[in-house]
């Protein structure tokens, strides 16, 4: 245990000691007592000692007490006690000034006081407090374990903690979501957590910070309160681990079922519906599939190689998705699927596909915004499928969501939300094989693609911009910050390389579709 210098001055013969200097440091903590009777004794100082001396080695040069005070303070000692009369009559003014500046108490110990007279009562107090602390820790730990074994969650645990320390308490997860709160007897919830200020204690699991406990203490936290809180943190961490283990088992069974569904490993729709009921899912009506993925995951993993952070961010994404959809579409199925989160938004019988799509789009936009806020600097992108009436079509809806996700990232960048329904002509191209897309792109853009790198980039971007602006030379030149004649020169060069007339709208359409094919090839790579 430990006491402050101020408290030590109320114990045994130290009651008769005087504070010569450094009074601002009376709250420095004493954990043990040592005696300095050799010139190098300070080298064994570990911290939090009350150092005692009769001053023999300083009798001829009392000014050397100043560097001793500085060294003791640097090493973290609590105080220096000097017995005067025999070798020293006083301390020099320089020593007093240094002790005052460092906030390091220098005490005058009564001459007729033996060291044992100080050591015995101080150690009795320290050991008695330590015994009391350990006994209290054992009792509290046993009590919290008894509560955990009843398997009723965090609330009873927090209620017991709140009653022990007579303060409101609350537990939050790593996403700052409140999980439970409790109040001591006679205290109403008004003005209690999470509104008021409080003391925050992190809750750690083996590989990550899982959340935090807040104690809304009205007064100072006593040493025994601290022991109680530390035991509670351990119990809360055990509850977190238990819930985590349960979720992992549930997640494995859910993922196995969804994998079977995606792979077509089922005998009939009736089998699918019955298996879904085991998890509380109603697949009787239509659905929309959503895939969400954090954008910078692969780059982060390659740069930092921290798989634990990677998994933690993925799990946080899953929890954020569950939170957002439980609020907006509580019937939705939210599950992790590799590095992505798969959401199956289920519509009630009477829900129109357009209404369900609007609800899903709104929920996904909210999720993407929340990821950007909570998981900074990471962002997330999402792909949303078309509406499908049968759950046995999940493979199709999943593929559409995957293609919409890849397309949105390639064309809109990070943080995008893309609906497969809104892809227009790209929906037709998405159904084509890589070979057919590559062949179409080569047929119309091949000669440009074979140009040297710098020329290829300039000419491809010029043609792409020209086509995007519907063949309007002035608008394309303005968009590229080029002179109109420079753009016309490039277009003549492109026509010569491709052997096409860019004025012909059919040629422009074919070239536009070829650019779309190139973009989709990049998406399919993703």
Image (cartoon, grey):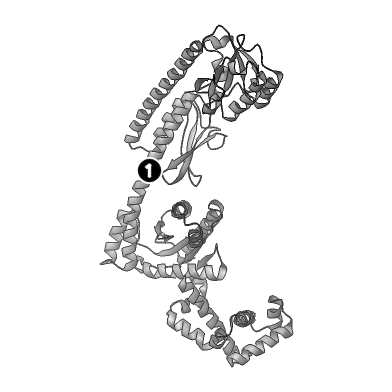
Check disc 1 and report its element: helix, strand or loop.
Answer: helix
Residue lying at 32% horizontally and 68% vertically, measured from the top left:
263
Determine whether 446 is above or below 304 in the image: below
* Residue 53 spot, x, y in % from top left: 56, 17
Picture quadrant of residue 91: top right
* Residue 526 spot, x, y in % from top left: 47, 70
Q: Is residue 501 visible to us here?
A: no
Relative to 358, is 481 on the left or the right?
A: right
Picture quadrant of residue 195: top right
Residue lying at 54% horizontally and 64% vertically, measured from the top left:
416
* Residue 193 spot, x, y in % from top left: 52, 35
Relative to 259, is 368 on the left or the right?
A: right
Residue sitting nearer the eye, 144 or 100: 100
Picture quadrant of residue 466: bottom right
Residue most toward the left?
Answer: 267
List the residue tagged with mark 1. 241
């Amino acid at each position: 245990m430990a006491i402050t210098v101020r408290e030590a001055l109320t114990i045994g013969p130290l009651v008769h000691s005087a504070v010569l200097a450094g009074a601002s440091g009376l709250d420095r903590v004493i954990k043990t007592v040592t005696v300095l009777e050799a010139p190098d004794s300070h080298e064994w100082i570990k911290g939090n000692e009350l150092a005692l001396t009769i001053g023999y080695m300083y009798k001829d040069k009392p000014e050397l007490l100043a560097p001793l005070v500085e060294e003791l303070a640097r090493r973290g000692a609590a105080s220096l006690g000097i017995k005067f009369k025999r070798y020293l009559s006083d301390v020099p003014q320089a020593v007093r000034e240094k002790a005052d500046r460092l906030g390091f108490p220098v005490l005058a110990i009564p001459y007729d006081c033996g060291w044992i007279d100080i050591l015995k009562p101080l150690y009795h107090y320290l050991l008695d407090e330590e015994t009391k602390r350990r006994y209290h820790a054992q009792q509290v730990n046993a009590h919290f374990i008894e509560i955990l074994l009843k398997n009723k969650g965090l609330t009873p645990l927090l209620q017991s903690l709140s009653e022990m320390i007579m303060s409101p308490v609350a537990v939050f997860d790593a996403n700052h979501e409140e999980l439970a709160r409790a109040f001591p007897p006679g205290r109403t919830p008004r003005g209690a957590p999470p509104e008021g200020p409080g003391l925050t204690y992190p809750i750690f699991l083996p590989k990550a910070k899982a959340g935090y406990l807040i104690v809304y203490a009205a007064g100072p936290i006593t040493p025994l309160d601290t022991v109680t809180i530390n035991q509670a943190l351990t119990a809360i961490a055990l509850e977190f681990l238990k819930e985590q283990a349960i979720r992992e088992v549930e997640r494995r069974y859910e993922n196995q079922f969804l994998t079977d569904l995606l792979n077509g490993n089922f005998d009939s729709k009736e089998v699918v519906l019955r298996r879904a009921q085991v998890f509380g899912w109603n697949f009787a009506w239509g659905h929309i599939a959503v895939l969400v993925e954090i954008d910078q995951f692969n780059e982060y993993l390659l740069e930092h190689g921290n798989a634990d952070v990677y998994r933690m961010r993925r799990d946080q994404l899953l929890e954020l998705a569950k939170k957002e959809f439980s609020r907006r579409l509580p019937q939705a199925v939210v599950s992790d699927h590799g590095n992505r989160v798969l959401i199956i938004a289920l519509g009630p019988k009477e829900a129109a596909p357009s209404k369900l799509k609007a609800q899903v789009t709104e929920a996904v936009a909210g999720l993407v915004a929340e990821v950007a806020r909570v998981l900074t600097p990471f962002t997330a992108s999402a792909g949303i499928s078309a509406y499908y009436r049968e759950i046995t079509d999940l493979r199709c809806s999943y593929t559409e969501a995957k293609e919409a996700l890849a397309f949105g990232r390639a064309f809109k960048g990070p943080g995008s939300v893309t609906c497969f329904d809104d892809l227009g002509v790209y929906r037709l191209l998405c159904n084509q094989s890589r070979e057919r897309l590559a062949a179409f792109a080569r047929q119309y853009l091949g000669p440009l693609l074979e140009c040297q790198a710098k020329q290829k980039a300039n000419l491809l971007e010029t043609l792409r911009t020209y086509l995007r602006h519907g063949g309007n030379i002035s608008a394309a030149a303005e968009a590229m910050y080029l002179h109109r004649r420079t753009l016309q020169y490039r277009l003549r060069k492109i026509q010569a390389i491709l052997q096409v007339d860019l004025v012909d709208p059919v040629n422009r359409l074919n070239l536009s579709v070829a650019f779309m094919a190139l973009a989709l090839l990049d998406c399919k790579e993703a």
